[in-house]
Amino acid sequence: MAFDGNFVHALLGELEVLKRGKINRIQQIDETSMVFKVRSAGSNHNLLISAHPMYARFHLTTHKYEFPFEPPMFLRVARKHLEGGIIQEIRQLGNDRRVEIHIQSRNEIGDEIRRILILEIMGRHSNIVITDADYRILDGVKHLTPNNNSRTIMPGFDYTAPPTEDKLNPRTDAIEELPSKIDFNAGRLNRQILSNVEGFSPLFVKEVEHNAGYFTIRNIVPAIRETMEKAENIKPVMYTDGDRDIFYFTPLSHLGEAYETYGSLSQLMDDYYHDRYRKSLIKQKAQDYLHLIEREYEKTERKVEKLKEDLAEAAEKDKYQKYGELLTAFMHQVKPYDESIEVIDYYTDEPLEIPLDKNLSASDNAQKYYKRYNKLKTRENSATVQLDRAREDLEYFAGLLHQMDSITTEEEVDEIREELAEQGIIKNNRKQSSKKKKNKIQLHAYRTTGGLDVLVGKNNKQNDYLTSRKAQNNHLWFHTKDIPGSHVVITHPASEIEDQDILEAAMLAAYHSKAQESESVPVDYTEIKHVHKVSGAKPGFVTYTDQKTVHVTPMKSKVEQMESGRTN
């Protein structure tokens, strides 16, 4: 990303449509993000403003958002002072990522008042501040106190701008002073430019350097002017750099060919930020369930280890049974107050020393060993059953942890919550449960290069629905061998499926498993008629027979190519 001062300058051109517009409604998405509904030039526009530490920005949006029922305090202040107001001016301060929106409004008695909405888009230091015409603060999304900050953002205080170095505005003649501020012998010229010029990002400076070839005292300012002049050609673009997406308001020759272009800067930012922001909210919503599952997994791990210890101790039971039998056979040799007795073990014909409690008779010592044997036998039987169950639980929680890593929608979070409630791990919310039952389970859909449809379940509820209800007996079912993962089904008769289709469906199963980053992942496949849900088993657990196994390597690019959307 590169939401720098140059980007802000370009974006304000799009926001000209909001001038003379009326702010009809203000709603707050979360603690740091708001939507202003503006009626301007006969059309409705939604202006999103965010001071989120990772996703700070402002732009027009077409996405729908949920809003909290109880308005936060900042929203109440904003509604009081800004709703019904007319946007008079939107201006950038210098070439910085700071913007003022001047709004003409009216107070409770109808007198005209002027309010200023100040946007500070500065990463984790971002803020949204409302002031009066004299820059006296009415409120801010983030309050800063003088105890641990260089400035104060609190109601009643005078607004002061964020402390910034004395930088040159590249849109004025001040940029001519740049060569005198650069030490060309010190190196790191890009960093020196960033330290001395306002509103530049490393991405833009790299473009300047690319155009200049290399910086000299004579070409540094002309190269900046030339690059900024080219940047007047606004064409929103998205580049990819490995796993990282980079956007900008104009093409950058040093990055090569853009993989996507947009009709407007707001469309670009909507596309870039909304998906990331939504995923962030989903992860936040799922975090409590993730911690709960992690605790259950760790608790079950400890239980497995304890049961193993019990079984190791119970393995000694046969020794105590033998002691009891030998004591009974050689009872006549035991003398009062003996602490042990040596007898011939008639199982091995070897001498064996048996410890005794000197305060008990020979008969009581024998009974003591018989009781210990019976106790350990009972413990062994119980521990064996519990260990099998605990191992199943451990596998179940491991699967849930994998599913939590791949959550992409709120519906999937709700399905996990509902499953945890059904398993008695969390308290069941009847109101939420009854509401969710009305919604159909959605599966993720793909298509092979041969044109066959493939469905994938991303959690246990989806897996059960896909395997037990959606798929037909002659469909092919896929799952990673002995590895937690999704159920995958080619929804066509097995007779129509080619080897290439099988390999691609197997790759989807490997990609949607815990072995996503591995190579040569074993994947079993068989017809649905050979897959059976075990009565009383955990959600998502099945047994299967008549399977074949293929080894595949997951490829993200191939999965994205096969993705065809979602289906019920």
Image (cartoon, rainbow, N blue to C red):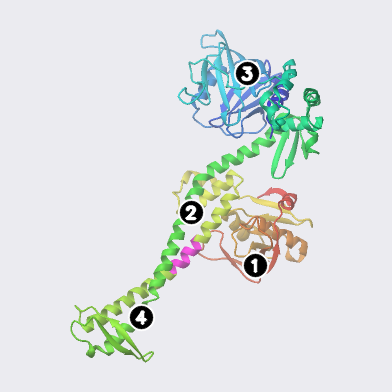
Which residue is disc 1 drawn over?
529
Disc 3 to disc 2, C-alpha distance:
52 Å
Q: Earlier in the sequence, mark 2 or mark 1?
A: 2
Q: Looking at the image, which residue is at 54% across and 32% down?
A: 30
Asked whether residue 264 is in view, the answer is yes
Helix, strand or loop at disc 1?
helix
Which residue is disc 4 drawn over?
319
Instruction: Sort mark 4 into few (<14), some (14-19) or many (20+) by Cα contacts within 10 Å.
Output: few
Helix, strand or loop at disc 4?
helix
In the visual, does 345 lie left or right of 407? left
**Three-letter residue code for mark 4:** Lys
Q: Which quadrant would residue 207 be assigned to in this image?
A: top right
Asked whether residue 437 is in view, the answer is no
Q: Earlier in the sequence, mark 3 or mark 2?
A: 3
Q: Which quadrant would residue 174 be assigned to in this image?
A: top right
Q: Earlier in the sequence, mark 2 or mark 4?
A: 4
Residue 391 located within the stretch drawn in magenta: yes
- Name the dominant secondary structure of the magenta segment: helix
Q: Are marks 3 and 2 in contact (CB under 8 Å)?
A: no
Q: Earlier in the sequence, mark 4 or mark 1?
A: 4
The answer to which of 36 and 316 lies nearer the viewer is 316
Helix, strand or loop at disc 2?
helix
Q: Which residues are magenta?
A: 385-393
Instruction: Sort mark 3 into few (<14), some (14-19) or many (20+) by Cα contacts within 10 Å.
Output: some
Disc 2 to disc 4, C-alpha distance:
45 Å
Which residue is disc 2 drawn over?
422
**Three-letter residue code for mark 2:** Glu
* Residue situated furthest front in the rendering: 185
